[in-house]
Image (spheres, rainbow, N blue to C red):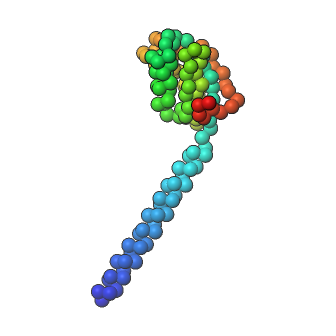
Amino acid sequence: MKKIIYLLVITMALISCKESKNEERLKTDSNKQVELTENLKSIEVDIEGMTCEIGCARLIQSKLSKVDGVTYTNVDFESKKGVITFDQNKLSAADISSNINKIAGGDLYSVSKTTELEEIITKMK
């Protein structure tokens, strides 16, 4: 009788381990689907109001990089332009402009022009 109970316990443990592995695999597969469905778009924005490289350009770049859906940001003080790549399923170009306009209380920076780029930028050149 003890042997039968012992075999049942071991069998139950093995079955539950296999089910856990299948659930983990399903979770991994669903994460891959989310990554594949990203609809990336890159835009270039002209930013007015920047007065310095470290304080302004880096602040804008830092704030944008924390926005959900933004995958790449590069703000250049010299040219007064920023290049942003984002997931169109989560954001629009207008949302990006709005986020820039809101930085520092909304009275320092403004987007004067937005241009869609044909090439998707994903890393620094």
Vertical order, 24 against 63 (above or below): below
Task: Tell me which residue sits at (56%, 19%) in the image.
Answer: 76
37 horizontally vs 51: left or right = right
Q: Quadrant of the N terminus?
A: bottom left
Q: Quadrant of the C terminus?
A: top right
Total labels: the figure holds 0
Vertical order, 19 against 80 (above or below): below
| Residue toward you, 53 or 43 | 53
Task: Tell me which residue sits at (66%, 21%) in the image.
Answer: 115
* Residue 90 at x, y percent in the picture: 55, 34
Q: Extreme front residue here? A: 125
Vertical order, 3 against 113 (above or below): below
Query: Which quadrant would residue 80 be assigned to in this image?
Result: top right
* Residue 4 at x, y percent in the picture: 34, 86
Vertical order, 91 against 97 (above or below): below
Task: Tell me which residue sits at (45%, 66%) in the image.
Answer: 19
Task: Tell me which residue sits at (57%, 14%) in the image.
Answer: 78
27 horizontally vs 80: left or right = left
Query: Which quadrant would residue 112 be assigned to in this image?
Result: top right
* Residue 43 at x, y percent in the picture: 63, 26
Q: Is residue 86 visible?
A: no
1 horizontally vs 75: left or right = left
